[in-house]
Image (cartoon, helix red, strand yellow):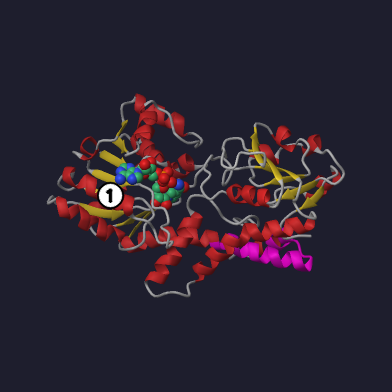
């Protein structure tokens, strides 16, 4: 099949490479010339395990090309997948301008019977508006569909190759069949549903996971007050099959390119349709305050950050990615700096140059970042950080170890001579 993917960001590049690996003729289209130049040379503009090899393989086979030309990419395409960004606008609704701009640009080149699919995360009503924009220019008979994406950065290739399910929102048998055919090689369960259901499923999945993180943080706050240990509480509740042991992350709150945005957008969407009191408004608020609250707690426990040197380990929003969108470090570093600390950071992949000054410098190893530190703060559970022997960087009796992701055994850290501080325990 001839497939075009519009937007060669995280989702677009991964999808394009994988659809090409199924034997389709795939074109990746972006308005960012620099990105397209890199991709044409087989270079992925971001870090994602396994993607570079997949890209090179499909380019070598001639199955995958990249362009900035709508005419080249859309002419003759049977399936056009829109995967452009949908950031939150100032009022926290989804900013759909890139979706609508791509619809306007593709319209003149659309072929008869083409399917325009929205893979980007968008609220109900968006596909109808997109179709209306295309119809202003095009008079061909085309179809619309929703195909939400559930991949996770850091394991995007594996997630796309082994999805839990494929959700297709459409109104015609022809569209369901074509999109099922596109995903046939995956052998995954396919959910055929209404367009609005597919769009709601995506927001619901992310909002649920974000709420689960917020929920356990709220419980952790209580544990800190009453002497319970959040890890023990999680173990105890996890035996209930309705609850489970998985996906409990007491810590800094949720970050990244999707959860904060999707919760905000679903909350804003709920307000826009008269559901003002929706729970997600509160989840969003709690998460926004999470890091401030935690830093206040830690400041109290270590008698303030003023004149302290903090080794901050982990900059990206989670392990195995260099994505810094809504990464906790981008809030923590300026806050620590305002509190009078000097921050020495380290990350295996991500770069944080904002605020590079005498108050923050990034180093190229854990050892260097921890040298002369008063506080070691583990912010991201990169395997290299979790597996590091911190006894090598213990340098004074009063050195604190802040385990902001509850990843370490407190007793082991204390035995090394650190004063251990975690989440949801005293
Ligand atoms: N990143 C994730 O983990 C993830 C997971 C699931 C769903 N999503 C959703 O997928 C969508 C894309 O996310 P992303 O992280 O890949 O975004 P991104 O910001 O990494 O990439 C978006 C790309 O779209 C391009 N673009 C913008 N306007 C364009 C236009 N008019 N024509 C062609 N290209 C255009 C940009 O140049 C950019 O390269 C979003 O709606 C997001 O919510 C993302």
Q: Which residue corresponds to the image point at 40% horizontal and 31% vertical from the top-left?
A: 55
Residue 60 in picture, x, y percent from top left: 35, 24
Vertical comparison of 123 with 103: above or below: below
- Span highlighted in magenta in the image: 211-234
Q: Is residue 224 magenta?
A: yes
User: Looking at the rendering, in which quadrant would you find the N terminus?
Assistant: top left
Position of residue 396 relative to residue 214, above or below, is above
- Classified by dominant secondary structure, the portion drawn in magenta counts as helix
Quadrant (top left/top right/bottom left/bottom right) for the C terminus: bottom right
384 above or below 230? above
Q: Is mark 1 within 8 Å of ligand 1?
A: yes
At 74% from the left and 51% from the top, the residue drawn is 305
Q: Residue at x 36, y 63 (%)?
A: 197
**Element type where label 1 sits in the image:** helix
Residue 277 shows in this picture: yes
Is residue 260 covered in magenta? no
Q: Position of residue 171 (x, y in %)?
A: 25, 60
Q: Which residue is mark 1?
A: 101
Answer with left or right where residue 272 lies relative to residue 279. left
In this view of the protein, which residue sits in the foreground, 110 or 311? 311
């Amino acid at each position: 099949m001839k497939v075009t993917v519009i937007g060669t960001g995280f989702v677009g590049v991964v999808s394009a490479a994988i659809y090409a690996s199924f034997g389709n003729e795939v074109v990746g289209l972006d308005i960012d010339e620099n990105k397209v130049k890199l991709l044409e040379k087989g270079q992925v503009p971001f870090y994602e395990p396994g993607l570079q090899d997949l890209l090179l393989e499909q380019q070598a086979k001639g199955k995958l090309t990249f362009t900035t030309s709508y005419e080249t990419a859309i002419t003759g395409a049977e399936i056009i997948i829109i995967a452009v960004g949908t950031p939150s606008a100032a009022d926290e609704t989804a900013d759909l301008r890139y979706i609508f701009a791509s619809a306007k640009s593709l319209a003149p080149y659309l072929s008869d019977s083409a399917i325009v699919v929205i893979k980007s995360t968008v609220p109900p009503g968006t596909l109808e508006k997109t179709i209306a924009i295309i119809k202003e220019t095009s008079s061909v008979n085309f179809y619309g569909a929703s195909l939400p994406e559930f991949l996770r950065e850091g394991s995007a290739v594996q997630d796309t190759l082994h999805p839990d399910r494929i959700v297709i929102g459409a109104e015609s048998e022809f569209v369901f069949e074509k999109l099922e055919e596109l995903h046939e090689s995956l052998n995954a369960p396919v959910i055929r549903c209404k367009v609005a259901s597919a769009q709601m499923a995506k927001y619901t999945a992310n909002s649920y996971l974000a709420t689960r993180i917020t929920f356990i943080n709220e419980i952790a706050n209580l544990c800190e007050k009453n002497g319970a240990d959040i890890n023990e509480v999680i173990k105890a509740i996890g035996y209930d099959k309705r609850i489970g042991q998985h996906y409990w992350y007491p810590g800094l709150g949720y970050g990244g390119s999707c959860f904060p945005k999707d919760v905000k957008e679903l909350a804003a969407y709920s307000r826009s349709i008269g559901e003002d009191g929706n729970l997600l408004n509160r989840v969003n608020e709690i998460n926004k305050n999470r890091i401030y609250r935690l830093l206040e707690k830690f400041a109290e426990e270590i008698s303030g950050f003023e004149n302290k040197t903090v080794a901050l380990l982990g900059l990206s929003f989670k392990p195995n990615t260099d994505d810094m969108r809504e990464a906790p470090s981008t809030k923590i570093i300026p806050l620590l700096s305002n509190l009078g600390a000097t921050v020495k950071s380290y990350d295996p992949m991500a770069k944080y140059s904002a605020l590079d000054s005498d108050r923050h410098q990034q180093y190229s190893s854990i050892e260097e970042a921890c040298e002369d530190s008063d506080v070691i703060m583990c912010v991201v559970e990169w395997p290299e950080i979790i597996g590091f022997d911190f006894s090598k960087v213990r340098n004074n009796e009063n050195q604190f170890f802040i385990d902001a992701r509850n990843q370490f055994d407190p007793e082991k850290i204390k035995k090394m001579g650190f004063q251990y501080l975690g989440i949801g325990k005293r």
